[in-house]
Image (tube, rainbow, N blue to C red):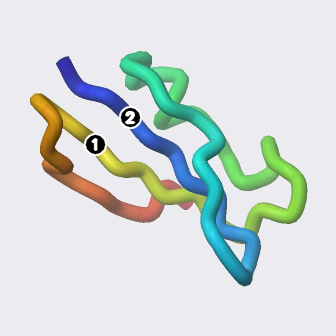
Amino acid sequence: MKIYVILSFDGEGMENVYVGADEEKALSLKPTDFENCEALFVEIWEDGEKTDDYRLE
């Protein structure tokens, strides 16, 4: 099972804003959904290992 971790970057640090298996929800999030968010990044985890990561928007 894939787990999606969405990280919000505010210019100084990153914070987890979503962790879950719902791909559609994870990939539909936008920086405007969160306060002081300059960019969102996604990490995809499968079987306890990170398999991919990239900037969402």
> Which amino acid does the dot numbered 2 rest on?
Tyr
Asked which quadrant contains residue 22, the reply is: top left
Which percent across, then down, holds residue 44? 28, 42
Q: Quadrant of the C terminus?
A: bottom right
Q: Pointer 1 and pointer 2: residues touching (CB < 8 Å)?
A: yes
Asked which quadrant contains residue 21, the reply is: top left
Q: Quadrant of the N terminus?
A: top left
On the image, numbered disc 2 is attached to which residue?
4
Which element type, helix, strand or loop, lies under badge 1? strand
| Rendered position, 36 above or below 46 | below
On the image, numbered disc 1 is attached to which residue?
44
Which percent across, then down, holds residue 7? 55, 53
Which percent across, then down, holds residue 30? 67, 46
| Rendered position, 19 above or below 11 | above
23 vs 16, left or right, is: left
Q: For marks 1 and 2, give the CA distance.
A: 5 Å
- For label 1, the crowd category at 10 Å Cα-Cα, with few meaning under 14, some 14 to 19 and many 20 or more, is many
